[in-house]
Amino acid sequence: MGWIIATIILSMMLTAMGFAVINLLKKNEKLEDFIAKQSEAINECDKRLKQVDNKGIFYADDEIGWFFKEVQKIQEALNEFTLN
Protein backbone atom coordinates (compact mmCIF):
# COMPACT_ATOMS: atom_id res chain seq x y z
CA MET A 1 0.00 0.00 0.00
CA GLY A 2 2.84 2.41 0.84
CA TRP A 3 4.53 1.87 -2.50
CA ILE A 4 1.31 2.89 -4.31
CA ILE A 5 1.22 6.21 -2.44
CA ALA A 6 4.93 6.73 -3.08
CA THR A 7 4.40 5.99 -6.80
CA ILE A 8 1.51 8.46 -6.98
CA ILE A 9 3.50 11.17 -5.20
CA LEU A 10 6.56 10.61 -7.39
CA SER A 11 4.39 10.65 -10.53
CA MET A 12 2.82 13.94 -9.49
CA MET A 13 6.25 15.43 -8.74
CA LEU A 14 7.60 14.24 -12.08
CA THR A 15 4.63 15.77 -13.91
CA ALA A 16 5.05 19.08 -12.07
CA MET A 17 8.77 19.12 -12.86
CA GLY A 18 8.03 18.36 -16.50
CA PHE A 19 5.69 21.37 -16.73
CA ALA A 20 8.27 23.55 -14.98
CA VAL A 21 11.03 22.51 -17.39
CA ILE A 22 8.80 23.13 -20.42
CA ASN A 23 7.86 26.56 -19.07
CA LEU A 24 11.52 27.45 -18.47
CA LEU A 25 12.48 26.28 -21.97
CA LYS A 26 9.79 28.51 -23.51
CA LYS A 27 11.02 31.50 -21.52
CA ASN A 28 14.62 30.75 -22.49
CA GLU A 29 13.70 30.60 -26.19
CA LYS A 30 11.93 33.97 -25.94
CA LEU A 31 15.00 35.50 -24.30
CA GLU A 32 17.29 33.99 -26.95
CA ASP A 33 15.11 35.55 -29.68
CA PHE A 34 15.17 38.90 -27.88
CA ILE A 35 18.96 38.80 -27.52
CA ALA A 36 19.39 37.84 -31.18
CA LYS A 37 17.20 40.77 -32.27
CA GLN A 38 19.10 43.17 -30.01
CA SER A 39 22.38 41.89 -31.38
CA GLU A 40 21.18 42.45 -34.95
CA ALA A 41 20.05 45.98 -34.08
CA ILE A 42 23.40 46.79 -32.48
CA ASN A 43 25.26 45.46 -35.52
CA GLU A 44 23.09 47.52 -37.88
CA CYS A 45 23.69 50.66 -35.79
CA ASP A 46 27.41 50.00 -35.89
CA LYS A 47 27.36 49.59 -39.68
CA ARG A 48 25.29 52.74 -40.12
CA LEU A 49 27.52 54.77 -37.81
CA LYS A 50 30.55 53.72 -39.85
CA GLN A 51 28.73 54.56 -43.11
CA VAL A 52 27.76 58.01 -41.86
CA ASP A 53 31.35 58.97 -41.16
CA ASN A 54 33.21 56.92 -43.74
CA LYS A 55 35.13 60.05 -44.83
CA GLY A 56 35.83 61.25 -41.28
CA ILE A 57 33.94 64.52 -41.76
CA PHE A 58 31.97 64.33 -38.52
CA TYR A 59 34.90 63.02 -36.53
CA ALA A 60 37.13 65.91 -37.61
CA ASP A 61 34.59 68.69 -37.03
CA ASP A 62 35.12 70.42 -33.66
CA GLU A 63 31.47 71.01 -32.76
CA ILE A 64 29.99 67.81 -34.12
CA GLY A 65 33.15 65.77 -33.56
CA TRP A 66 32.74 65.71 -29.77
CA PHE A 67 29.20 64.40 -30.05
CA PHE A 68 30.18 61.89 -32.71
CA LYS A 69 33.04 60.59 -30.57
CA GLU A 70 30.62 60.11 -27.66
CA VAL A 71 28.20 58.22 -29.90
CA GLN A 72 31.08 56.02 -31.02
CA LYS A 73 31.97 55.28 -27.39
CA ILE A 74 28.39 54.24 -26.73
CA GLN A 75 28.43 52.06 -29.84
CA GLU A 76 31.68 50.41 -28.75
CA ALA A 77 30.11 49.62 -25.37
CA LEU A 78 27.06 48.17 -27.11
CA ASN A 79 29.25 46.06 -29.39
CA GLU A 80 30.35 44.08 -26.34
CA PHE A 81 26.78 42.78 -26.02
CA THR A 82 26.48 41.33 -29.52
CA LEU A 83 26.44 37.65 -30.31
CA ASN A 84 29.67 36.49 -31.88
Image (cartoon, grey):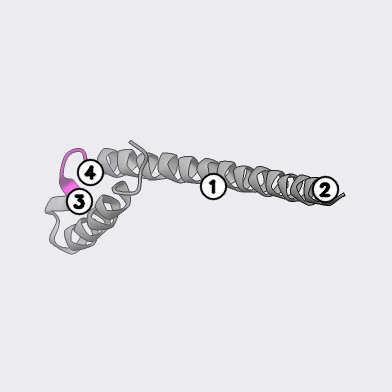
Between circles 1 and 3, the one closer to the viewer is 1
Q: Residue at x 14, y 56 (%)?
A: 61
Between circles 2 and 3, the one closer to the viewer is 2
Residue 5 position within the rendered picture, expressed as x and y whole percent measured from the top left: 83, 51
Label 4 sits on residue: 53
Give how far apart the Cα atoms at labels 4 and 2 are: 68 Å
Q: State if disc 3 and disc 1 touch (CB < 8 Å).
A: no
Q: State if disc 3 and disc 4 touch (CB < 8 Å).
A: yes
Q: In the drawing, does residue 4 fall left or right of residue 33?
A: right
Give how far apart the Cα atoms at labels 1 and 4 are: 33 Å
For disc 2, the neighbor class at 10 Å (few under 14, some 14 to 19, many from 20) is few
| Numbered disc 4: secondary structure | loop
Mark 2 and mark 1 lie on one chain; the one further toward the N terminus is 2
Please give the range of residues in magenta: 53-57
Q: Which mark is residue 31?
A: 1
- Residue 70: image quadrant is bottom left
